[in-house]
Amino acid sequence: MGLSDTLFGLFSDWAMSSEVIAHERPAALQAAHGEVLELGFGTGLNLPYFPNAVKRLTVIDPQDLVPKRVAERIAAARFPVERARLGAEHLPFDDNRFDCAVSTFTICTIGDPGAAMREVLRVLKPGGSFLFLEHGLSDDPAVAKWQWRLDPIQRVIGRGCHITRRIDRLVAEGGLEIVHLDRYVIARMMRMHGTIYRGAAVARK
């Protein structure tokens, strides 16, 4: 791992472990259960917030950030954790394998989010759930205008992170049926980065 990867990993871990972000995780993950797939594991910050109903967690991420810190978090998990270093667009898992899939602050960086959502649909059992907590495009035209202006810079700073994606639309276009959606702005965050899509979708097959 190069110096730039190390610095990005440390910055990402610091930013995403902030109190305001941590406050959002329990509500987003409370319905996770059974055998779970997590897209964009990052530095493992979701691990303490998964409920006891989770029996096993399979995590994927194309990057391996702050590996020592991540290993410590995995060792402290209450359930087995299996890791794979890969993207979400092509999953090496059987059809109908998982009871649940989750994504937190990840869809913004996936190169082909439509393909990723179709893969989530494929690997979920019929009736399986997809839980998501993501930032994206604001409904406020003034905020959205600035998001579009700043998105090219954000993609460089955030290594592919977009602030202009309509998360609900991407989930639905992947074939998942959204059954619950909360739209709000996280307190004490800039609206361009803190416009949140939190919800649940179901794999109807």
Image (cartoon, rainbow, N blue to C red):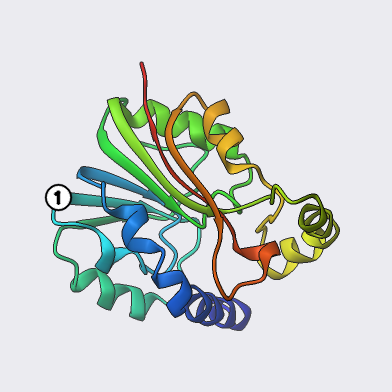
Q: Is residue 94 visible?
A: no
Q: Quadrant of residue 168?
A: top right
Task: Name the residue: 26% across, 36% down.
Answer: 98
> Of residues 98 and 140, which is closer to you in this image?
140
* Circle 1: residue type: Ala
Q: Residue at x 45, y 27 (%)?
A: 176
Q: Is residue 10 above or below residue 165?
A: below
Residue identified by numbered label 1: 53
**Which corner quadrant of the image does residue 121 belong to?**
top left
Q: Position of residue 188 (x, y in %)?
A: 58, 76
Q: Residue 56 or 17: which is nearer the viewer? A: 17
The reply, left or right, for residue 42 in relation to residue 26 is right
Q: Is residue 154 above or below residue 17?
A: above
Q: Could you tell whether 133 is left or right of 32 in the image?
A: right
Please, is residue 125 above or below residue 91 in the view? above
Residue 34 lies in quadrant: top left
Outermost residue, top side:
205
Image position, residue 203 (x, y; %): 37, 26
Expressed as whole percent of the image width and height from the top left, the position of residue 151 reads 78, 58
Q: Position of residue 192 (x, y in %)?
A: 70, 63
Dot 1: few (<14), some (14–19), or many (≥20) neighbours within 10 Å?
few
Q: Secondary structure at mark 1?
A: loop
Residue sitting at x 16%, y 57%? 80
Q: Quadrant of the C terminus?
A: top left
In the image, what residue occupies the spot 36% across and 67% down? 44
From the viewer's perspective, tell me whether residue 63 is left or right of residue 128: right
Q: How many marks?
A: 1
From where the camera sits, is residue 167 visible? Answer: yes
